């Protein structure tokens, strides 16, 4: 079973990403609530530029999602957000402290999770990412 | 320059490819796979010049067997590379790794020209000889180093958001 899982993970990872998640701190799930400045629906990664006015995360963040195909399969589209929208995004911040984030999921107005990924790698013992 | 790249990236051609679910990964994948036909075979020629592979074969034979595959491979890699650049011109222009990649590509091109015009015309003198002129060996070693660095930089580009 363990071998099967290792093979399955090995096969799944390259499909998920244009690059690995090494530059992000995958053990941190941070919530970013603010105003969408720009929504870029594109490959190899979609981006949501979000501005947070106050609090510890104040500033403009570049939240990177997956490819249009991966996000499209999970309910995202080119009209999910537009500039000026309020958004709540949960993601993993860059390790180097710069204002970049790997998107984990968005929380829609009715409180549902809008996934952008099927599974994300986590450090050993950090629990499931689902 | 940035102004021009901004325009280029926002043409309908660039936007269409950038937002295409299948076309974009196909172009990206083709760019990478074409490496095996171009750089992969250039590496073989470099190894022959350095006498690390195909030692018993004349250099001319190795070269004439490899080039009909390496040149079309290079053309595919070059064209898909240009298309990928167009789809994200502004971002690529600002990317430090991409800038070094282009610089090293230019050096690799110059290095190939040096080999082609300085050493290739006299190939018959050392085609089957137990040694290759130091200058030609130098271009081979430089080519190996440059291509490894170019591929590494191309890959690392993705790690700048």
Image: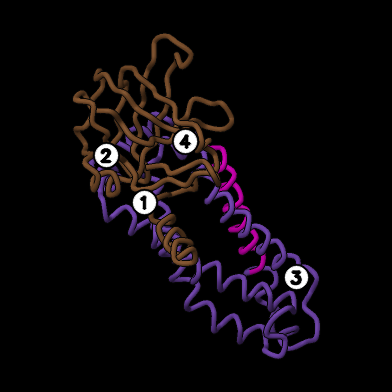
Chain colours: A brown, B purple
Q: Determine the main secondary structure of the stretch shown in magenta.
A: helix
Give the chain letter at badge 4. B
Q: Return the x and y of residue B102 as percentages of the image width and height.
A: 55, 47
Of helix, strand and loop, which one carries label 2? loop
Classify residue B107 as left or right of residue A115.
Answer: right
Distance (Cα) linking label 3 and label 2? 45 Å
Residue at 75% x, 83% y is: B126
Which callout, 2 or 1, points at the residue further toward the start of the chain? 2
Q: Are marks 3 and 2 in contact (CB under 8 Å)?
A: no
Name the one closer to the observer, B57 or B114.
B57
Of helix, strand and loop, which one carries label 4? loop
Distance (Cα) linking label 2 and label 1? 12 Å
Give the chain letter at badge 1. B
The relative height of residue B69 versus residue A116 in the rendered view (above or below) is below
Magenta range is B95-115
Residue at 48% x, 78% y is: B68
Residue denoted by label 3: B137
**Front: mark 2 or 4:** 4
Distance (Cα) linking label 3 and label 4? 39 Å
Residue denoted by label 2: B11
Q: Return the x and y of residue B132 as percentages of the image width and height.
A: 77, 78
Q: Return the x and y of residue B55 as percentages of the image width and height.
A: 72, 86
Name the quadrant of the N terminus of chain A. Answer: bottom left
Name the one closer to the observer, B35 or A31.
A31
Residue denoted by label 1: B83
Name the quadrant of the C terminus of chain A. Answer: top left
On whether residue B106 falls in the magenta region, the answer is yes
Residue denoted by label 4: B161
Give the chain letter at badge 2. B
Of helix, strand and loop, which one carries label 1? helix
Q: Are marks 3 and 4 in contact (CB under 8 Å)?
A: no
């Amino acid at each position: 079973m363990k071998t099967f899982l290792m093979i399955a993970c090995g096969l799944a990872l390259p499909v998920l990403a244009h690059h690995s998640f090494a530059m992000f701190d995958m053990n941190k799930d941070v919530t970013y609530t603010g105003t969408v400045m720009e929504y870029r629906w594109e490959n190899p990664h979609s981006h949501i530029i979000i501005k947070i006015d106050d609090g510890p995360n104040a500033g403009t963040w570049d939240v990177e999602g997956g490819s249009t195909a991966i996000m499209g399969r999970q309910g995202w589209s080119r009209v999910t957000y537009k500039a000026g929208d309020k958004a709540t995004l949960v993601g993993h911040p860059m390790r180097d402290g710069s204002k970049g984030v790997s998107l984990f999921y968005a929380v829609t107005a009715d409180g549902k999770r809008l996934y952008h990924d099927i599974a994300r790698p986590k450090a050993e013992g950090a629990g499931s990412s689902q | 320059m940035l102004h021009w790249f901004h325009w280029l990236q926002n043409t309908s051609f660039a936007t269409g490819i950038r937002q295409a679910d299948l076309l974009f990964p196909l172009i990206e994948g083709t760019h990478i796979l074409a490496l095996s036909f171009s750089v992969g075979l250039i590496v073989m020629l470099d190894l022959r010049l350095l006498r690390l592979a195909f030692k018993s074969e004349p250099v001319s034979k190795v070269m004439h067997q490899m080039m009909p595959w390496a040149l079309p491979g290079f053309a595919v890699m070059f064209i898909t590379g240009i298309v990928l650049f167009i789809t994200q011109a502004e971002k690529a222009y600002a990317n430090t790794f991409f800038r070094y990649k282009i610089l090293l590509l230019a050096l690799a091109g110059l290095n190939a020209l040096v080999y082609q015009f300085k050493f290739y015309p006299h190939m018959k003198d050392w085609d089957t000889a137990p040694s290759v002129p130091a200058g030609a060996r130098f271009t081979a070693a430089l080519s190996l180093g440059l291509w490894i660095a170019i591929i590494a930089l191309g890959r690392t580009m993705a790690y700048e958001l």
